[in-house]
Amino acid sequence: MAKEQSEKKSTSKKNPTPATKTAKARSEMKKPVDAKKPAPEPRTPDVEGAPTANASQAASRAPRTPDPRLPTPGTVLKKLDRHGSVRCECTVEEGGIRYAGKVYRSLSAAAMAAAKDLGLTNRTANGYVWWGLSKPPRKSGDPLVALDRAWERYHGNVAALVKEGVTDENRATVLTTIEKHVQAIESLREKVA
């Protein structure tokens, strides 16, 4: 009987139950990682040209081709306020964009750093728009609402000109310009009618 029990014990050690396997796996997961161990060597591809385990890391370290929209290196880009005063500036370099003594990999990263320095709470920024290299995309909305807003701006400008800006010297020019606008609007009205 003692022999049978010792055989059971020895077989249970050789063939652990699934519960024993799980407990062993958990205990191995809890073992502290030795910080002094060297990092594993990067894998080389088994087949020439096949991607390696570190392909994404190698691609991130590879030299980037400059964006063709960027101005030439050495160009200083300035962020202006509505009055034309310079709020901040950056310089385009071969390796990126230098702002406040630090080189950023993109215009957007430099724009976010500048926004943070200016106390703005942007979560993202389009660097090309921020530094004035392109205009912001137009919001798509109701074209009739946009037309009404444009008319209000136009009418306000013309009313202000007629009220205070017409002089004897420019009266004929103002009248000719307004008549030209009336004709253009009439031709559009005929197309719609």
Image: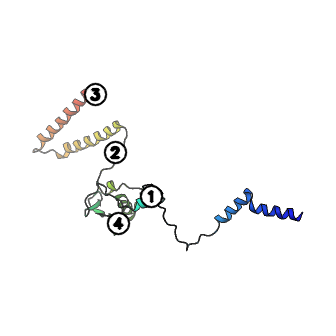
Label 3 sits on a secondary structure element that is helix
Marks 3 and 1: CB-CB under 8 Å? Answer: no
The tag earlier along the polypeptide, 3 or 2, is 2
Which element carries disc 2, helix, strand or loop?
loop
Pinpoint residue 69: horizontal percent, then vertical percent: 29, 54
**Location of mark 1 (residue):** 56
For mark 3, does the 10 Å Cα neighbourhood hold few (<14), some (14 to 19), or many (20 or more) residues? few
Q: CA distance from mark 1 to mark 4?
A: 22 Å
Q: Counting other residues with Cα less than 10 Å from the Cα at mark 4, is it few (<14), some (14-19), or many (20 or more)?
A: some
The residue labelled by disc 4 is 103
Front residue (pair 29, 165): 29
Foreground tag (1 vs 4): 1
- Horizontal and vertical percent for residue 89? 30, 63
Q: Please give the count of numbered marks on the rendered protein.
A: 4
Type of the residue with mark 4: Val
List the residue tagged with mark 2.
138
Which comes sooner in the sequence, label 1 or label 4?
1
> Which is more foreground, mark 3 or mark 2?
2
In the displayed orientation, state which residue is furthest to the bottom. 36
Task: For marks 2 and 1, give the CA distance.
Answer: 35 Å
Residue at numbered disc 3? 192
Q: Amino acid at mark 1?
A: Ser
Do the numbered discs 3 and 4 sit on residues whose CB atoms are within 8 Å? no
Classify mark 1: helix, strand or loop: helix
